[in-house]
Amino acid sequence: MADFCTIDDVREFLQLDIDEESKIASCMRAIVAATEAIRNYCHQEIELVEDDEITLDCWGGQRLFLPQVPVVSVSSVVEDGDTLTAGSDEDYQLGQHGILYRVGRNWASGVQIITVTYTHGYETIPDDVVDVCTRAASRAFQAGLRASEMDGVPGIVSTSLGDFSVSFGAEGGGGISEGVMGASASRMLLLSEKDTLNRYRYVAQ
């Protein structure tokens, strides 16, 4: 699966050179972590997935909600072993928001009773998702750099050499109740970023 931003995105956002092998590896790890955090929060793949086959439970009614959106196309629907035909005068129709409507009757009721093959997601990752991923990955990357500079000791805000001294402080995470300390506790998604992602989030019906 593709990541939602690139090293170039992080490099441009932070205005830093990321060209050493260790920094490139650290940045890629941060990007992968940020991408997975977005997928997990949204319960969505987001990127384009073609001919994805899923088998769903259904408890009747005329509407069946497909879990991955946006739905680009539906190539096959099998209900309790019977292959259905799409069309307003046939067996089902695809509506908005990933809803399959049964025509003239209710969907069959049962566990793992309907199998759908469909294409879903965005061919090009939306700009706001790229932006959230870039910012989240940048924070994780910076947290790693700070941890490396401070030998892994969290909360150091300053050091000196003559008559050695060190100062500690809490690291702010960008909002109320979002303070964090240390690279391992670096918050991946801020509340403001979750607000941005809510438009892509799937809530089970």
Image: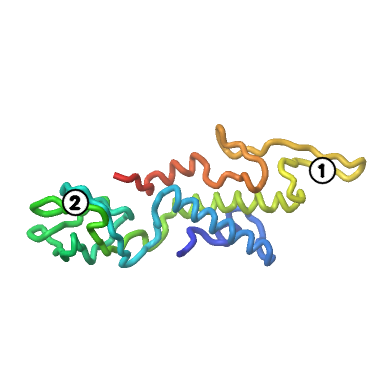
| Residue assigned mark 1 | 159
Instruction: Give the number of the mark in front: 1 or 2.
Output: 2
Helix, strand, or loop for circle 1? strand
| Residue assigned mark 2 | 109
Please, which colouring scheme is shown? rainbow
Q: What residue is drawn where x is 15% and y is 62%? A: 86
Residue 98, percent from left and from top: 26, 53
Q: Is residue 192 found left or right of 110 in the rendered image?
A: right
Q: What residue is drawn where x is 49% and y is 61%? A: 3
Residue 141, percent from left and from top: 63, 54
Residue 119, percent from left and from top: 30, 63
Q: Which quadrant holds the N terminus? A: bottom left
Q: Is residue 54 found left or right of 142 in the rendered image?
A: left
Q: Amino acid at mark 1?
A: Thr
Residue 87, percent from left and from top: 12, 61
The answer to whether the residues at label 1 and label 2 have Cβ atoms under 8 Å apart is: no
In the rendered view, would you say 32 is above or below 182?
below
Q: What residue is drawn where x is 63% and y is 37%? A: 172
Disc 2 crowd rating (10 Å Cα; few below 14, some 14-19, many 20+) is some
Q: Nearer the viewer, residue 13 or 183?
A: 183
Q: Amino acid at mark 2?
A: Ser
Q: Nearer the viewer, residue 196 or 59?
A: 59
